[in-house]
Image (cartoon, rainbow, N blue to C red):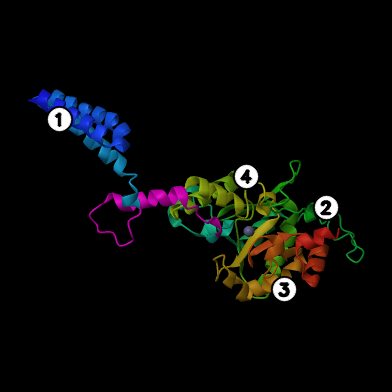
């Protein structure tokens, strides 16, 4: 029966080939395929196990390859819901093919990272945003005793500035901290623990805090000095924050290193920068600039050698958003020139 069927098929095909000359060349392949199926059927006929194995293999093949079937991926937005794979498949395609436009994502700066995402606070053991109040610092510096008053001997009027002056060292994205930069870290012991900054600015800082206090402004200082390890922790936290917003590690790293201060490029690391707020407005945000404390600092800090380092409208020069709380010590003479001319440290530096 089987043989006769196969033979009949073969004969029919050959006859067909002789009649239709155009189809002559197709006859042999058709016969070959037909023979294959005849023999396969004969092989499986009456052998349930063999048939089951073949069926399973085919089924698995279909299931696995279905993940890449365009019909599932291309489905329109209003999915019929029958196919749970399709949504995931669509995401996969987006991740592979559509490049995420990183410029659309808001860059986080150090202050954002310190203020945001309380769930990551533990990583830094609460040393973020520790606020040292002015009265505490003044009290502590009084205990510290008067330092030799070697300052203010130079004449402010014919002050000549030099790029080598430690007070004028320029730290930004283009200028990282020189490898041979050394300074002695001054410690002010407060109730909240030790507060660190460059030892040479402590006296001027004390004078500024005292003057503000006399004008009825209670200043507080957070995170004055951060070492490399701290900056690295901050950087790691920044990456976590980006990842919590749906970015991959690589994207988060890329963005993290673009944003403000990669380790080694923060003024906080050389103890010359201070984040100053008031007890009544402790958050580091733009609104601080409108508070009496923010206004007082912007108007008076230069008298004590500090400048508002990242002013409004100069973002294109500093590369950093307006930060009404971030003050940088440059010495009274330079601070006076910079504040009077309304320029940034970058601009001041260019003319040196
Ligand atoms: Zn700062």
Query: Dot 4, crowdedness within 10 Å: few (<14), some or many (≥20)?
Result: some
The residue identified by callout 4 is 228
**Tag 4, which secondary structure?**
helix
Residue 101 percent across, percent down from the top left: 52, 56
Among numbered discs 3 and 4, the one appearing first in the sequence: 4
**Tag 3, which secondary structure?**
helix
Query: Dot 3, crowdedness within 10 Å: few (<14), some or many (≥20)?
Result: few
Q: CA distance from mark 4 to mark 1?
A: 65 Å
Splitting the image into 4 quarters, where does residue 56 fall?
top left
Q: Who is closer to the viewer here, 175 or 66?
A: 66
Q: Who is closer to the viewer here, 347 or 148?
A: 347
The residue identified by callout 3 is 299
Residue bounds of the magenta highlight: 74-103
Residue 32 percent across, percent down from the top left: 25, 27
Q: CA distance from mark 4 to mark 2?
A: 23 Å
Tell me: is circle 4 under 8 Å from ligand 1.
Answer: no
Among numbered discs 4 and 2, the one appearing first in the sequence: 2
The residue identified by callout 1 is 52
Rendered residue at 67%/55% (across/down): 143
Between marks 2 and 1 in the image, the one whose residue lies nearer the viewer: 1
Q: Is residue 145 magenta?
A: no
The residue identified by callout 2 is 165
Whether tag 4 and tag 2 are in contact, CB under 8 A, the answer is no
Among numbered discs 2 and 1, the one appearing first in the sequence: 1
Q: In this rendering, is residue 169 above or below 301?
A: above
Q: In this rendering, is residue 236 above or below 294?
A: above
Q: Is residue 102 magenta?
A: yes
Residue 302 percent across, percent down from the top left: 76, 67
């Amino acid at each position: 029966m089987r043989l006769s069927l196969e033979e009949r098929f073969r004969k029919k095909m050959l006859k067909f080939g002789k009649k239709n000359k155009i189809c002559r060349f197709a006859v042999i392949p058709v016969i070959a395929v037909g023979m294959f199926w005849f023999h396969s059927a004969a092989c499986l006929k009456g052998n349930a196990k063999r048939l089951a194995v073949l069926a399973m293999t085919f089924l698995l093949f279909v299931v696995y390859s279905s993940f890449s079937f365009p019909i599932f991926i291309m489905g329109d937005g209003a999915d019929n819901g029958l196919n749970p794979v399709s949504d995931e498949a669509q995401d996969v395609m987006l991740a592979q093919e559509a490049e995420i436009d990183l410029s659309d994502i808001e860059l986080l700066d150090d202050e954002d990272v310190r203020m945001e995402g309380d769930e990551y606070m533990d990583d830094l053991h609460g040393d973020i945003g520790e606020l040292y109040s002015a009265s505490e610092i003044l009290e502590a510096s009084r205990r510290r005793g008067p330092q030799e008053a070697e300052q203010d001997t130079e004449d402010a009027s014919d002050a000549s500035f030099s790029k080598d002056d430690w007070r004028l060292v320029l730290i930004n994205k283009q200028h990282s901290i020189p490898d041979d930069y050394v300074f002695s870290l001054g410690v002010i012991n407060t109730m909240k623990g030790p507060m660190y900054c460059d030892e040479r600015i402590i006296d001027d800082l004390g004078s500024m805090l005292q003057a503000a206090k006399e004008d009825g402004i209670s200043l507080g200082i957070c995170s004055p000095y951060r070492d490399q390890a701290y900056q690295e922790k901050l950087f790691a936290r920044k990456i976590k924050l980006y990842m919590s917003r749906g970015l991959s590690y690589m994207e988060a790293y890329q963005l993290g290193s673009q944003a403000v201060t990669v380790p080694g490029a923060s003024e906080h690391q050389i103890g010359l920068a201070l984040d100053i707020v008031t007890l009544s407005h402790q958050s580091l945000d733009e609104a601080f600039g409108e508070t009496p404390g923010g206004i007082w600092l912007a108007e008076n800090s230069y008298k004590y050698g500090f400048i508002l380092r990242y002013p409004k409208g100069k973002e294109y020069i500093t590369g950093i958003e307006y930060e009404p709380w971030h003050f940088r010590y440059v010495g009274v003479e330079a601070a006076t020139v910079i504040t009077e001319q309304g320029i940034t440290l970058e601009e001041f530096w260019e003319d040196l």
